[in-house]
Image (cartoon, rainbow, N blue to C red):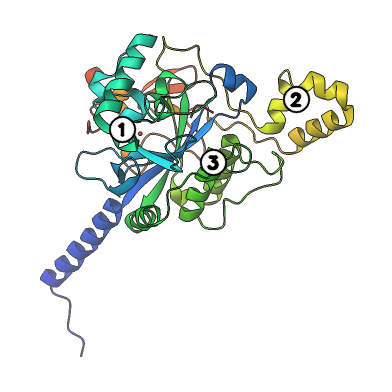
């Protein structure tokens, strides 16, 4: 004869189920693909831009060693660079990566060249000497440590967030720390986007492989972003959200939109000599561009993050954007199709204030 469940045992079951639910939510964090716009003269020659990967739960023990984040830490940005003392990848905390400072409250609203150089030099002397005292700062022809910090003074970027589990992040930390961190950078077939592609393939196995089209076998930031968005439409459980991280004005002219290889060749000055030298090649590039257009990768309702509201990147669940139907949510002031996330000083009480190559 079966015994009836007592009220006390039923309460214990409900408590256990609630505990499991809370644990499952706590075990999820966020990663993000950062599609960074091209800038400057090199960005005119190569308008594909730059890719990096942000993880909310993974922090930099050193620029070349990863660990789990502690309480209050906001994660790190990991990317492949050239000319960084022979290292293949470097990890930088989120706020310094974007603004060369360690506290969001210290981010200037506008900068000039002396300010950017001072902030970068101060952060380098405090945290980057382990990369080598003779590491070059960088310039037009060669990369350097200036690529690693203050990126938002150079360009605008878009963060495409996705959920990760603690097990995935721990496995990734172990894999990166155990592998040889030796430079494999090659602009055409082993660039920053190839690095991001391999990282995403660790989290979503078999989904991010090299493609012959639309970029002739080369991997570009726009191509990887399109693949992530396509994957998210088929797998809404990763909860893809799109955020804009604006360029801080004053140091450079505004950065430009990312382009694919074929798009760059037919929509810039490259098109004229290609048509003159071989109109058939030009026609083929145009057909390739039309056949493999990657569409609009920036939803109309994307949200703009200020330095004080970057904490939203550390929380899973996507409370402010429905990627599937792109409906604008009432979490900020809508300007030009984008919702601006207010900082703590303007009353954004819904957000926790815990304080992510020049190609």
Residue denoted by label 2: 266
Q: CA distance from mark 1 to mark 2?
A: 41 Å
| Above or below: residue 173 compared with residue 37 | below
| Above or below: residue 104 compared with residue 235 | above
> Residue 155 appears at what percent x and percent y?
47, 21
223 to the left or right of 65:
right
Q: Earlier in the sequence, mark 1 or mark 2?
A: 1
Q: CA distance from mark 2 to mark 3?
A: 27 Å
Residue denoted by label 1: 128
Q: Rate crowding at label 3 as few (under 14), some (14 to 19) or many (20 or more) other CA atoms within 10 Å.
A: many
Image quadrant occupied by the N terminus = bottom left
Q: Earlier in the sequence, mark 2 or mark 3?
A: 3
- Residue at the (37%, 23%) spot, across then down: 150
**Front disc: 2 or 3:** 3
> Residue 110 appears at what percent x and percent y?
35, 10
> Residue 289 appears at what percent x and percent y?
74, 33
Image quadrant occupied by the C terminus = top right
In the picture, the disc for residue 30 is none
- Residue at the (15%, 67%) spot, across then down: 12
233 to the left or right of 344:
right
Q: CA distance from mark 3 to mark 1?
A: 20 Å
Q: Rate crowding at label 1 as few (under 14), some (14 to 19) or many (20 or more) other CA atoms within 10 Å.
A: some
> In the structure shown, which secondary structural element does the residue marked by tag 1 occupy?
helix
Judge whether residue 215 can be spotted in this image. yes
> Residue 31 appears at what percent x and percent y?
40, 44
Residue denoted by label 3: 185
Task: Determine the residue located farthest toward the bottom in the rendered image.
Answer: 1
- Residue at the (29%, 54%) spot, across then down: 27
């Amino acid at each position: 004869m079966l015994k009836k469940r007592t009220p006390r045992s039923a309460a214990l079951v409900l408590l256990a189920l609630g505990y499991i639910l809370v644990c499952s939510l706590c075990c999820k964090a966020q990663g993000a693909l950062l599609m960074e716009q091209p800038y400057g003269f090199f960005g005119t020659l190569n308008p594909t831009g730059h890719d990096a990967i942000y993880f909310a739960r993974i922090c930099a023990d050193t620029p070349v060693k990863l660990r789990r984040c502690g309480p209050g830490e906001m994660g790190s940005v990991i990317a492949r660079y050239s000319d960084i003392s022979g290292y293949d990848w470097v990890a930088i905390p989120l706020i310094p990566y974007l603004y060369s400072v360690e506290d969001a409250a210290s981010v200037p609203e506008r900068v000039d060249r002396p300010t950017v150089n001072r902030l970068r030099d101060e952060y380098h002397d405090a945290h980057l000497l382990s990369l080598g005292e003779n590491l070059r700062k960088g310039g037009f022809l060669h990369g350097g440590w200036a690529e690693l910090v203050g990126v938002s003074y150079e360009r605008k970027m878009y963060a495409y967030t996705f959920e990760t589990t603690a097990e995935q992040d721990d496995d990734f930390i172990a894999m990166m720390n155990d592998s040889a961190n030796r430079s494999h950078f090659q602009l055409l077939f082993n660039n920053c986007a190839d690095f991001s592609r391999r990282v995403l393939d660790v989290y979503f196995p078999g989904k991010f492989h090299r493609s012959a089209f639309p970029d002739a076998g080369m991997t570009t930031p726009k191509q990887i972003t399109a693949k992530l968005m396509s994957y998210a439409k088929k797998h809404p459980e990763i909860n893809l959200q799109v955020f804009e991280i604006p360029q801080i004005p004053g140091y450079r002219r505004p950065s430009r939109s990312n382009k694919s290889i074929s798009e760059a060749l037919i929509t810039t000055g490259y098109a004229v000599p290609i048509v003159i030298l071989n109109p058939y090649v030009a026609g083929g590039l145009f057909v390739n561009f039309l056949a493999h257009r990657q569409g609009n990768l920036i939803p109309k309702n994307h949200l703009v993050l200020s330095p004080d509201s970057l904490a939203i990147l550390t929380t899973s669940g996507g409370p402010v954007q429905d990627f599937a139907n792109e409906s604008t949510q009432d979490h900020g002031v809508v300007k030009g199709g984008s919702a601006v996330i207010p900082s703590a000083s303007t009353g954004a009480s819904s957000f926790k204030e815990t304080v992510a190559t020049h190609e």
